[in-house]
Amino acid sequence: MKSPELKESLWVQILKTLLLVLSALGYTWPHVGEVGHLVVVFAVIVASILAFTAARARVRAIWCVAIAFVMTCIGALGSSLTLQTFGVYDVASTIQVSRFWYFSALIFGIVFMTRSLALRWRTTQILEAVLVIGTFVYLFFEHRDLNLTSPRNFADLIYSRGFNPMDVYRWIGIGAAFLAIPMVFGRAKFGRVVYAMGCMALLALLLTSLIGTARLNPSAVDPLGLRGDQKQDSGQNDEPDSDDENDENDENDENDENDGSSGGNSDEDNSGQAGDNNSSNGNGKSNNNGNSNSNSNSDKPQPVAVAVFYDEYQPASGVFYFRQNVLSEYDGNHLVASTMDDDVISSMPATGNAQAVAIQNEDLHSKISTSMFLMVEHSQPPQLAMGQRIFTIQNPDPSLFVASYGVESLGLTVDVQRFIGRRSIPKDWSEQKRDHYLKIPDDPRYRALSDTIVRQIDPRFAEDDVVKALYIKTWLEKNGFYTRKTRHIDDKDSTASFLFGSLRGYCVHFAHSAALLFRSQGIAARVAIGYAFDNRMRGTNSAVLIMGNQAHAWPEIFIDGVGWVTLDIYPENSDEPPSAFVDQDLESLFGELARNDKSGGKAEQPRSESIGIPWQTLAIFTLALLGFALLLCYSRKIVIIVLGRHCSTPNQIHRAARAAIFVWSMYGHSWRAHLTLEAFARNHDATARLVRLATASRLGATLSDEDARTARALLNDAMREASAETPVWRRILGWVNPFVRI
């Protein structure tokens, strides 16, 4: 019995087997040892050979699927039995043997089934392509949501070579699609496959050169939940989720809490996102808990900015505050941004610089110079302490940083307790400005609670604004409970829900409660939003890596003769786990990249220019090479026809016959389907006569120059025959197509 014709040629089967070997190793590499890798390779090769044998032997597909299922069950059973024989082997050997059973049988079953189906039906070859592409998805799944630094070991290796992981990941994706091409081939000729893969490579090269360099660019969200359900700059709605855990996401996104048009902290729990680092240890230091997450199913915070210091500055509280904006205007329901806060730079200057109105007393502050390098878009630029001026600087790596700017700030160098005895509201403030920073909800409970708190103050300091603020701060720290599991939803006053309810919440609740209680005692107050970085988590270098989970909100009070002073709340009780230290190697790496050292500080002499790939030059060269190849192909067509029409001797008659067959093939009529030229030309009189004449010339028959002239005339007739039997559109395509096989 004749063996059935398989849907794949032998070389395609070999190539697919090699790709499946690589795919299987990608899936199992982290789970088995060196011997296990050999077992996996052996299983793939054996499964491919058996699938080929089964197809040639006409084994039904249903039996092949059944065999694959049985092998998978045997692997699972063998793995389970191995684990039960723990007493025979040591623990490590038991686990290793169990994995051998499981992965070898599972890989064998999958490969045997997919290979068996692909050899029978061409449509099932897509399953093998999915397996190959799935390998890359599996290996780089940690990179989802544009997680720049994951997988960490791979990203660090790329950075140390002076390249951007985003671009490398993009090329890996293109490579996955490139490798998947052979998985959908059947009985294609090797040359045609090489041609298709070459076109794919050219397309990938042109695509990457046109779209530019990739960079981290997630969608805009509201890390602190200050927007409520209003539309954000990205045009997305921050709708409330069904549970709080789902709300705690996207810490890597910009801290774009309020642009002056949204409702401040309206229904701040609608997004339920804490994003702050403000659970306390009771000593006035922030615990910097890695609260929120960019990925709902991952606990890895993502970097959002790098701050490079040029001056020594140690904040009195031990926390670096990178302020973006403030909320000070009470609109009847919530605190929102206001133009009254002209001492805050809340927008990025397009060019030049932006200057804040000078309010802070420079004698009590130290001047700080920093450079900020943003890794995600921020509509409100973070600035260390009290930013006074922002100016644009050169971006050292546009592929990594979306923006870079310099900041001149003022950092308070005196502890707030040194200001006891000073009033809050200056005498020269206008009535409008005074009312602006003292306005509170029309709810008597705020004043009643604050009166109860300050009643414990020593009578000597009963009217001191700073002492009142410190007592309110201490009361919130002792009685509040930091948690992200409690929500406070109130259309009228969500702060009251927290303050006069359970006192369980996160930084947004504590900051707004403190500000309103301060105001009820005649202390000018507002809420600042940005990032807070615990100095204890900082490495030994002069750069600070700001993570998305450090988004924070804190209160500020105004002290006459000083300016605005940060008075953050550090709850003593919290259900948040201890925070992890920032990876100092990663912090140092990004710091060096911000300083334009593409080796991440690992080169002996940091270079100012990275060794980049000249994409434009490569694209021009490739286009030129492609143009030259097309020119050769079209020249070949013209030469064949011209030589055929100018045959002048009997030895050149075969050129006319070749030109005639070439024209027929160009118009889509292949003589190979008829096995012989004579059979193909049988129904075409002029072509048949020309083929017989060329055959006689090849066999050594005596011909004259008259026969050569006859061949030229027959060629013209054969070309007219081909045109008459071919539609116009196919003739046009025939001339446009540079590749014609004869």
Image (cartoon, grey):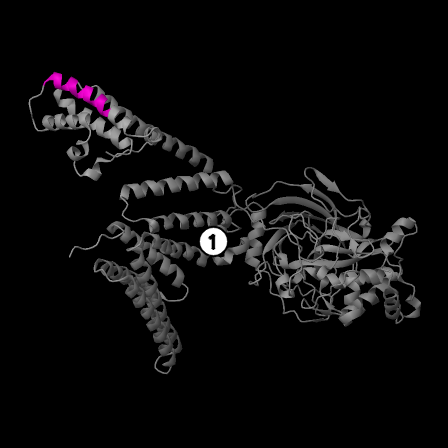
Left or right: residue 710 compared with residue 167: left
In which quadrant of the rendered view does residue 43 lie?
Answer: bottom left
Is residue 420 in view?
A: no
Q: Position of residue 398 (x, y in %)?
A: 57, 43
Q: Nearer the viewer, residue 103 or 726?
A: 726
In the displayed structure, would residue 125 be above or below residue 653? below
Q: Which residue is mark 1?
A: 157
Q: Position of residue 653 (x, y in %)?
A: 15, 23
Q: What span is colored magenta in the figure?
A: 704-719
594 falls in the magenta region: no
Left or right: residue 336 compared with residue 89: right
Helix, strand, or loop for circle 1? helix
Q: Position of residue 34 (x, y in %)?
A: 34, 65
The residue positioned 37% from the left and 83% from the top of the image is 87
In the displayed structure, would residue 657 be above or below residue 675? above
Is residue 509 in view?
A: yes
> What residue occupies the far bottom of the structure in this picture?
87
- Tell me the quadrant of the picture where the C terminus can be found: top left
